[in-house]
Amino acid sequence: NDLTIERKELASQGNRDKHFNQGSLLLFIGIAFAIEGPLNTYARAGKLFPGPHLYAGAGLVVLWALAASMVPAMQKGSDTARTVHIGANLAGIGLFVWQ
């Protein structure tokens, strides 16, 4: 049927691998900056400044970890894991835009 043909065509494009690679790079860079930011602040000021920006950054790292942890279950076909993955990333985008 047409749906099967379309799925095979999409699978042959390697979008899943591209998405995984881009997500892995974003995860690495994001966590590196989430650690570097507070370290830089502490090195310059001698203290951290608890507030929305610090908490949003920590929350974003947690959401990225949650999204990444869903990958094995998604590879096994779990729709729940897919929904959690998408939801965690949307919430992370919300935190990023807010700050």
Image (spheres, rainbow, N blue to C red):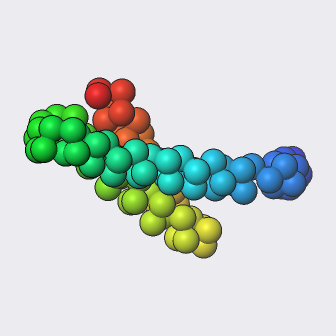
Q: Is residue 33 visible?
A: yes
Q: Quick one: 4 or 65, which is closer to the camera?
A: 65
Q: Looking at the figure, which quarter contains the C terminus?
A: top left
Q: Quick one: 37 or 13, which is closer to the camera?
A: 37
Q: Quick one: 35 or 17, which is closer to the camera?
A: 35
Q: In percent of the image, x 33 and y 51: which residue is there?
A: 35
Q: In percent of the image, x 22 and y 45: which residue is there?
A: 43
Residue 2: percent from left, percent from top: 87, 47
The answer to whether residue 98 is above or below residue 60 is above
Q: Is 77 positioned to the left or the right of 17 in the image?
A: left
Residue 63: percent from left, percent from top: 35, 52
Residue closest to the far top: 98
Q: Is residue 59 visible?
A: no
Q: In percent of the image, x 29 and y 27: which residue is there?
A: 98
Residue 70: percent from left, percent from top: 47, 64
Q: In percent of the image, x 43 and y 51: which residue is there?
A: 32
